[in-house]
Amino acid sequence: MNQEAETEYVRELLGRAVDEVEVPGSRGSETVFAKASRVRWRRRTAATGAVAAAVAAGLVFGPGMLDDTGHGASVASTPTAGEYTTKAGRFAKLLPAGTGKISEISLVRLFKQAPKAPEPEPVGPYDGAYAVARPGGVGYIAVGVVTASGIATKTGGKGLGNPCKDAPKDGRLGCTTQKLSDGSLLALWETPPTDPALHPVPAGGRELDARLVLKDGSFVEVRASTGFQGKGQLGPLLRTPPLTRAQLGKLVQNPALRK
């Protein structure tokens, strides 16, 4: 992975967190809602340049992991011993039983419909995106880890602030933060679906998001989405995100995501 691709990975992944600056001025409610929709769309599509990156946000894979369609191996959320050897199988082991059929995917390739689109180098062992297939629909879970040095470079050394500070102005709903006993900060929020009529590129469905900001300044982010509509769509949207808010909060704290 060359330096230019790595820089683009960090830029795209962090774009959601630090590039959404409110422009002063008086606006009507219609303009405000349209702006919030654009912000949500920008946060999601920023992921296409990174992890499904990750929000936004962990869409990267090692060489040979994916076929030319952007898909990899598929396993149930309770895989067999043999399936644990695949990346999708190992990730499925971290999920609650019954989550669904887990497949490694590339949102970069699916969104862009570019089978040979390059994948940036992952930071964490599970950085990437995973389709979650259930009867009636397909959603996805995306994981991304960003180092403290990457954040410092992007923010000019300032680091990331409280992700709930500007909610819901930036599209986040029900945003909460919790200081954990180890000094890390856990943030949870919901991202409403975007309107396909406003965005000709893939429009994201309802999404639950979790970010764990660690004491060293790095962070882990996990998104659980009902899916997306448009180019590269994997199937009908799920009725609900593949993980509950509580399950998502537990998953993002799992040390396995950053080892």
Image (cartoon, rainbow, N blue to C red):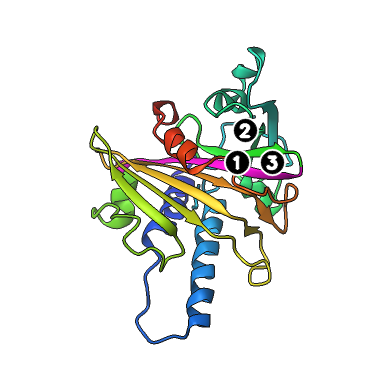
Asked whether 151 or 186 is in front, the reply is 186
* Element on which disc 1 rests: loop
Which quarter of the image is occupied by the C terminus? Answer: top left
- Evaluate whether residue 47 shows in this view: yes
> Residue at the location (66% across, 54% down)?
228
Give the distance between the C-alpha atoms of the residues marked 2 and 3, in whole angstroms: 21 Å
Q: Are marks 1 and 2 in contact (CB under 8 Å)?
A: yes
Total labels: the figure holds 3
Residue 12's x, y, as percent? 47, 54
Q: Secondary structure at mark 3?
A: loop
Q: CA distance from mark 3 to mark 1?
A: 20 Å
Name the residue carrying label 1. Answer: 242
Q: Which mark is residue 99?
A: 2
Asked whether the beta carbons under mark 3 and mark 1 sit within 8 Å of each other, the answer is no
Tell me if residue 25 is in the magenta stretch.
no
Q: Tag 2's secondary structure?
A: loop
**Given the image, on which type of amino acid does mark 1 rest?**
Pro
Q: Residues within 10 Å of mark 3 (few under 14, many from 20)?
A: many
- Tell me which label, 3 or 1, sits earlier in the chain: 3
- Nearer to us in this view, 179 or 125: 179
Q: Residues within 10 Å of mark 2 (few under 14, many from 20)?
A: some
Start-end of magenta stretch: 136-148
Q: Nearer the viewer, residue 208 or 1?
A: 208
Which amino acid type is marked by label 3? Gly
Marked residue nearer the N-terminal end (2 or 3): 3
Residue at position x 73%, y 47% from top?
234
Identified at 28% across, 50% down, the residue is: 152
Measured Cα–Cα span from mark 1 to mark 2 = 6 Å
- Which residue has dot 3 on it? 70
Q: Single out the mark in the foreground, 2 or 3.
A: 2
**Magenta stretch: residue 140 in it?**
yes
